[in-house]
Image (tube, helix red, strand yellow):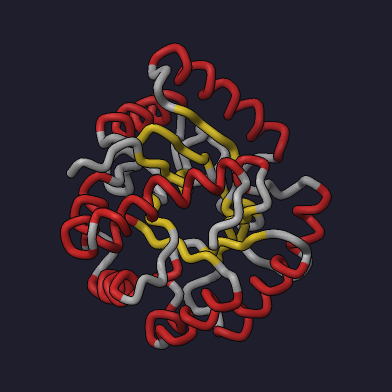
Amino acid sequence: MSIKGFTDIHCHIIPTVDDGAQNMKEAQEMIRLAYAGDTRRIIATPHYGTSRAKASGGIIVARFRELLRWTEDNYPEMELFLGQELTYSHGLEKQIDRGSAFTMAGSRYALVEFQPEDDYSRIRQGLQSVQLAGYWPILAHAERCQRLASHIEYVDELVHMGIYIQINARSVTGGNGWQCKSCAKKLLKQELVHFVASDGHDTKKRTPVLLKAMTYIAKRYGKKYALQLSVENPGKVISDIFID
């Protein structure tokens, strides 16, 4: 595939702050794997607002900077940015306003996740509350939301509301089970996806690699769409540019 220089907008690569990289060595190996798979930009997205979150904002920033320094020394072509995966709860937008919850690379984009079993009404209202506060919500791994997987028309409604949709690379290739793969394929076919990201957590099972999924998408749905999902739209997040 001719598309290179992917940007991964969802990756748990900062060590010891959540259920992602468990030490600096593992984080460094994740950088190596991502680079080998043609990724050149990563937004680190540690968990926020869930029991999987293990560190305060100050510690997250300190450990991110440590990993950034190592990456600059060893992989100078790899760029790292800081964000968070925000588990939705009432009042999340106020926590973003205060700076206790991070947006994506300091932009107006916010990566928001819900529980797989959450009702559509909660998903819709939660995303809308973040949106009305002036942020641009990205729904994390939409294919894992059971109500959306069984009602693709709900995703279409969210997109028409101005919500952005992210799916996981492993779901595209079948690594997250047939239900997630089926939903991902339906969303891609209808062009309801704005981002494909790794949701990388480790170096074995949930790796920070996009190449296999993007090769499949380019072949099945076209290089132009694959470029949008993995390079153009993620670049607009980092640059804080609105995606039409």
Q: How many marks?
A: 0
* Residue at position x 49%, y 43% in the image: 235
**Of residues 232 and 37, the one drawn nearer to the viewer in this rendering:** 232
* On screen, residue 200 above or below 80: below
Most foreground residue, 109 or 24:
109
Residue 70 in the figure: left or right of residue 125: left
Q: Is residue 112 above or below residue 103?
A: below
In the rendered view, does 103 fall on the left or right side of 16?
right
* Residue 142 vertical placement versus 210 (above, below): below
Q: Quadrant of residue 49?
A: bottom right
Quarter containing the C terminus: bottom right
The answer to which image quadrant residue 126 occupies is: bottom right
Which residue corresponds to the image point at 71% horizontal and 49% vertical from the top-left?
101
| Picture coordinates of residue 175, whole percent (x, y) | 24, 59
Q: Is residue 53 visible?
A: no
* Residue sitting at x 37%, y 58%: 168
Q: Is residue 52 left or right of residue 100?
A: left
Task: Depth check: give the residue in front, 27 or 121.
Answer: 121
Quadrant, the N terminus: top left
Residue 193: give x, y in percent of width and height. Answer: 41, 66
The residue depicted at 45 percent of the width and 75 percent of the height is 145
x, y (%) of residue 50? 62, 57
- Residue extending farthest to the top is 73
> Does residue 193 appear in the picture of this structure?
yes
- From the viewer's perspective, tell me whether residue 81 is left or right of residue 207: right
